[in-house]
Amino acid sequence: MLSGKRATLSIKQYLGFLILGHLCFNWGLFGQTIAPPTPTASTFTIYGFTTSSIYPPNGYTGMPSFNPNSNQLAVYEADARNVAQAERMRKQLLAEAEATFGYGVDTSLPSFKNSKGAQHYQNAYARLLAMQHSPFSVKKATFIIENAFYEETKEYMEFERAIKQTGDFLREKMKELKLDSNSNLAKNYLLFQFFADTLEIRSKGLKHLPFEYDFDDFWGKRDWSNMFVHKLLLTGKGQCSSLPKLYLILAEEIGAKAHLALSPNHSYIKFPDDAGHWHNIELTNNMLTTDAFILNSGFVKSAAIQNRIFMHPLDEREFRSHLSPLLL
């Protein structure tokens, strides 16, 4: 229970008021983003923390899950027939090409084994393969993949320190708010606040500012590192690739259960509350969304839902393969 001079609120009521506030003030549409120059700092200065006491300067209740009714089942079946027909057409065209030209379609890809920088990706390949024989870490896998792009110039200890310090901040804030550390709802909502709001621990003079959506080069076409968690930590700006990944890294750090979910050209967070009901977090505009909202945004076919491609909370194996096929 949270006690005050005038009233006593349960954690559930407290979180309900906070969620209601977000739904009232953060209603909008989610989208994509763009970014600043490639980070060159050798040490992390964690974005948003305005004190050096712990963070050195160097250094809804949402709608239930989509459940097709009898009318929608007919749409599902029609989509499945269309998918099967398209596959038959593809095979027929390939057979006709082979019969006409006397050879099949060449699907081989060129090798870049000897290209500049290729060794860094080969090293990452070896490290990712080694992770198959140890407990999976979102933090470590993300660092390995991003560090290959940086030609292995970043230090894992710095990245790990930044995540641990942020985890310490979150754990301290949970204590200050007297939230149940065993509640998955409490931990995920605090994580949501960390991304969306200004959070303070006044007793220690700590403050963290909300992350922002980056509208500069959000596809990473000019600089692929604009898609990275590393860049998000340095600048406080990200998009639907880096924001959910950092959320999952921090969820792993504080022991919260959360999953990545996909929709066309987009990714977001799904998490179960303490009663097993699923909720969606949209980090690009700081919303708690429903499955119906995502469906109404368009481009989500029923066949993709049936085949667990879109709007499905990825399990560990699926998320590992999302990061890299090497982690299957």
Image (tube, helix red, strand yellow):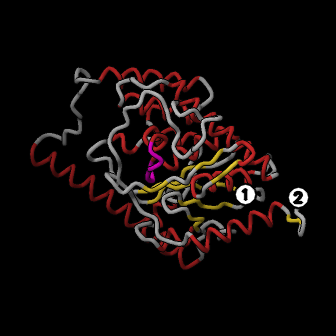
Point out residue 190 in the picture as x, y percentages from the top left corner.
68, 53
Determine the residue positioned at 50% across, 68% down. Answer: 294
Q: Is residue 166 above or below residue 1?
A: above
Point out residue 127 in the picture as x, y percentages from the top left corner.
47, 22
Residue interval drawn in magenta = 235-241
In the image, 29: left or right of 82? right
Q: Residues within 10 Å of mark 2 (few under 14, many from 20)?
A: few
The span from disc 2 to disc 1 (Cα, nearest Å) is 18 Å
In front: mark 2 or mark 1?
A: 2
Q: Which residue is mark 2?
A: 1
Which element carries disc 1, helix, strand or loop?
A: loop
Frontmost residue, 259 versus 182: 182
What amino acid is found at the position of numbered circle 1 in the picture? Asp
Q: Which residue is mark 1?
A: 273
The N terminus - image quarter = bottom right
Q: Is residue 41 above or below residue 67?
A: above
Q: Residues within 10 Å of mark 1 (few under 14, many from 20)?
A: some
Asked whether residue 237 is drawn in magenta, I would say: yes
Point out residue 27 in the picture as x, y percentages from the top left corner.
54, 72
Determine the residue positioned at 39% across, 23% down. Answer: 152
Q: Is residue 309 visible?
A: no
How many marks on residues?
Answer: 2
What label does residue 73 carry, if any? none
